[in-house]
Amino acid sequence: MIVLTSKQMREVEQKAIEKIGIPSICLMENAGREVAIEVKKLLEEHDLKSVVIIAGKGNNGGDGYVLARNLYNWGIDVKVFLTANPALITGDAKRNLDAILNMGIYVAEITQRKHLKFLEKIIKDSDLIVDAIYGIGLRGEITGIYREVIEMINQSNKVVVSIDIPSGLNADTGRVEGCAVKAHKTVTMQFLKPGLLLYPGVDYAGEVSVADIGISHKLAEEVGYNYSLVGLEDVKLQKRYGDTHKGDYGKALIMAGSKNMTGAAHMCAKSAIKTGCGLVKLAVPQTIQQVLQSDLYEVITYGVEDENGIFSYKALDQLLKLIDESEVIAIGPGMTHNEDISRLVCEIVKNVDKPMVLDADALNALVGSLDVIKNKNVILTPHYGEMARLTGLKISEIKDNIFEVVKDFCEKYKVTLVLKGSKTIIGSKDGRIYINNTGNPGMATAGSGDVLTGMITAFLAQGFDAINAAVYGVFYHGKAGDIAKEHFGEYSMTATNIIEFISEAFKCGM
């Protein structure tokens, strides 16, 4: 699903007006009516009767005036409060404000603190609040009377609907600009905005619906959007042909594990098999091979030279031979980190040109040596802490500029990046960004990342290119976690539970 930044959305609207010839007031009319339909549904569902619309001076407020007109025509008790002097309202917004004034709809100003008491009383006596104060063009922090109005909305304990984006929320980053409306539902126009999909924006937006206001998706393509929300329609799985064998579904080698982290290797290999890889080989320190071999019936295990249960650089030749016999490689889960492993990982990445997934300790091994991944067919899967170590940025800096950080990293090193988090972001070397929408807090558990590495590796082995392997892997990993949540809840879910439900997740995409 297309996701547009605030700048791109304005460009698309301008094209609709100037190139296609759709009058801007028609776009406002469509937007206001779509919100009215959603508000009417909520009123009926919750047996509510009255609506207060709090509107700003811009086009977001204009949408609110159209909403008021439609609700009034349907016999709904509606009142409108302006956060700006009516003399400052111009263009299409003014025409729609004049219309509701001519209709006799109640309109009042909240431009001074002395008006707040009256607004508070009206809100208390009403059932639903519509936030039409700011749209996607918000710049700077919310202060003064606007802040007090937003805080009043949030403290009202009423059903709240925001138009386009909750006022006070940055449409591009999901960051709260001082304060923001906490909506139960947000009706956004034509295309999703990044700020609705990232935390903390997700918590403020509530349920999000996309209103069709009559703008063609082709205009978004002309503008050149580069963000997409991954949906089930994007990750459909192909039915397998009857005349096939395991060799048709790829040969993967996983380098993982150490004496204290046998589970990471186990879960990575197990998830690769469950995700459909034809043949999975698992290279582990020879000290722990027997432990893993006893429980991984479908995986071929190899014990390579180690030192005290940890991979040794002396195992390089053994590993290169195994790599030569494989089609894709995954490195990192549970390997631990020391100088030998750093040398080993860098040497393999530098000298191997096969598709590769690098996770966990393989990422730690790359710190300070990132040039070895340039132009390689590599997928990196860091969480925020690992990304901070790779880039030298603070975690807060990454979260505040997540799309730019991912985009810049991918373009600099020409790799695919999976930045794991509450909303996992996938970046491609051509600058495209994919936002995943599956998964839940129960997946924040030991081993979950190892399962994801196995799944991405399996898709790579089955012939998916790097970006699709990453997108499919992340989506179905989250989907399996969502199904596991239904059975075990968020508190009791384990990484093994995620593996158990990979097959159920796949049924959704068939």
Image (spheres, helix red, strand yellow):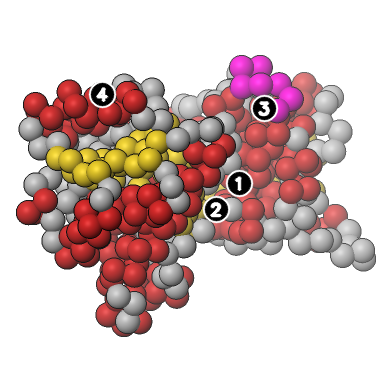
The answer to whether residue 504 is seen in the rendering is yes
Judged by depth in the image, the label closer to the viewer, 3 or 1, is: 3
**Distance from Cα at disc 3 to Cα at disc 2:** 20 Å
Q: Which residue is mark 4?
A: 121
**Distance from Cα at disc 3 to Cα at disc 4:** 42 Å
Side of 18 relative to 42 (left or right): left
- At label 1, the amino acid type is Phe
Identify whether 229 is placed above or below 346.
below
- At label 4, the amino acid type is Lys
What x and y, as percent, mark residue 177? 22, 36
Q: Which residue is mark 2?
A: 230
**Distance from Cα at disc 4 to Cα at disc 1:** 46 Å
Neighbourhood count class around disc 3 (C-alpha, 10 Å): few under 14, some 14–19, many 20 upward: many
Marks 4/1 in contact by CB < 8 Å: the verdict is no
Q: Which residue is mark 1?
A: 475
Side of 477 relative to 366 (left or right): right
Q: Looking at the image, is mark 4 or mark 1 earlier in the sequence?
A: 4
The answer to whether residue 400 is seen in the rendering is no
Side of 250 relative to 167 (left or right): right
- At label 2, the amino acid type is Val
User: Which numbered tag is attached to residue 485?
Assistant: 3
Q: Picture quarter containing residue 400?
A: top left
What x and y, as percent, mark residue 510? 77, 55
Marks 3/4 in contact by CB < 8 Å: the verdict is no
Marks 1/2 in contact by CB < 8 Å: the verdict is yes
Range of residues picked out in magenta: 486-492
SS label for mark 1:
helix
Judged by depth in the image, the label closer to the viewer, 2 or 4, is: 4
Q: Looking at the image, is mark 3 or mark 1 earlier in the sequence?
A: 1
Q: Looking at the image, is mark 2 or mark 4 earlier in the sequence?
A: 4
Q: Looking at the image, is mark 1 or mark 2 earlier in the sequence?
A: 2
Question: Is 159 colored magenta in this rendering?
Answer: no
